[in-house]
Amino acid sequence: MSLALAERPQIDALSSIRTYVQSELPPLVDAIDKGQIYPADFMRGLGAQGAFNGHADISKPDLNRSIDAMAEVSEVCGASGFMAWCQAALVWYIANTDNDVLKSKLLAKTASAQILGGTGLSNPMKSFFGIEKMKLKGKRVEGGYVVNGSLPWVSNLGPDHYFGTICDLDGGQTMMFVANCADPALKLLDCDAFLAMDGTGTYGLQFKDVFIPDALVLAHDAAPFVKKIRAGFILLQAGMATGIIRDCINLMQRTKSQLGHVNSYLTAQQPEDFAAILDTLDTEVRTLAATPYEESQSYWRRVVTVRLEAGDATMAAAHATMLHTGARGYMMSHRAQRRMREAYFVGIVTPATKQLRKMLAEMPA
Ligand SMILES: Cc1cc2nc3c(=O)[nH]c(=O)nc-3n(C[C@H](O)[C@H](O)[C@H](O)COP(=O)(O)OP(=O)(O)OC[C@H]3O[C@@H](n4cnc5c(N)ncnc54)[C@H](O)[C@@H]3O)c2cc1C
């Protein structure tokens, strides 16, 4: 009884997020998918509903609350679910820094989405696991660092946004910082059209002697900081997978009355199969997300494994949805094809399927 009462505010918060998402997002989805709009106002409204503050207090970080909110968004629109992850990741970095100046400047405002932003960690994450070289180089100067280089894609950005990223320093060390898109030395370049995700405020970033003051440094030594935030970074992505899979299950269920007599031959690709897979994933994510600072190798292996399984399940569910919906789902006006395009993003966004497999293959037993 007392537990139920204690949980009530959280349940109410999620149901108000659901109400907000279901009333505000559907009319925007088509334009977001076509890259005609970047939904800044929707994202700010989402923040005002508490979608990004679950994990902002690191004395009791509630990643599951943020994952649940992201799943609500992704169930309607994968691109918006991805933007929610970008924002949530930025909040997670700032929440975990020891830099109190940075925290007091940006934590409350990013957690409430008054300030929007994202994360440019794909290249550093790939670099840490020996896949590619670091693209940003920093040099220590009086009161901060000067950073040069470029990143091919960072999302949920605009002229007044912020994002977290990492640069190499001389001597093999790395430094993690928040960059301010309003800095004239930092250029946001338009990207060519994508398969999906065009309305996500995704830009190429060019750093030309960008001064990063100490006030924007997340960690002078990025390596231990990344170790601290990496499980949360990955587990938060589960919200994208959960939401897309849930909608795929809905879409498959809906074909039953007309096409059940033939769709039943799609063995092991039934909505009930995906509901069972989702249930297992959800249980594992919830368990792991409850202790994001756990340091054991077995914990890290489970985090990487569940992320891989979530990506695989999202792509498999979207694939099955295409087969269940048939010609209907093949029409551009039907959302099955959008879910399929969005699902592939879960498999390629860092850490991508191939990186996760490499990480698992190289992990000590
Ligand atoms: C729509 C979209 C949004 C993204 N948003 C973010 C984000 O917010 N933050 C972030 O850090 N990463 C972002 N990424 C990158 C993403 O996380 C992955 O790194 C990317 O999808 C490739 O991962 P991969 O492991 O498959 O690498 P691969 O595709 O195997 O290799 C990627 C590398 O190849 C090079 N490359 C390949 N094609 C191009 C190209 N057309 N232009 C320039 N370089 C190229 C680059 O060096 C790049 O790092 C985004 C990607 C996409 C498609």
Image (tube, grey):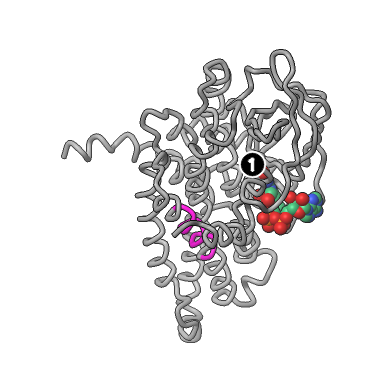
Residue 279 locus on image (x, y percent) = 37, 61
Q: Is mark 1 within 8 Å of ligand 1?
A: yes
Q: Main secondary structure of the magenta part?
A: helix
Element assignment for label 1:
loop
Q: Which is nearer the eye, 272 or 202?
A: 202
- The magenta-colored residue range is 303-312
Image quadrant occupied by the C terminus: bottom left
Task: Name the quadrant containing residue 137.
Answer: top right
- Residue 251 coordinates in the image, percent (x, y): 51, 67
Q: Mark yes or no: residue 102 visible.
A: yes
Is 8 displayed left or right of 240 in the figure? left
Q: Residue 99 falls in which quadrant of the image?
A: top right
Left or right, 4 with respect to 227, comes to left
Residue 175's x, y, as percent? 64, 30
At 39% from the left and 55% from the top, the residue drawn is: 282
Mark 1, other Cα within 10 Å: few <14 / some 14–19 / many ≥20: many
The N terminus is located in which quarter? top left
**Residue at 42%, 62% in the rendered image:** 278
Q: Which residue is identified by label 1?
A: 121
Q: Was residue 310 drawn as part of the magenta stretch in this picture?
A: yes
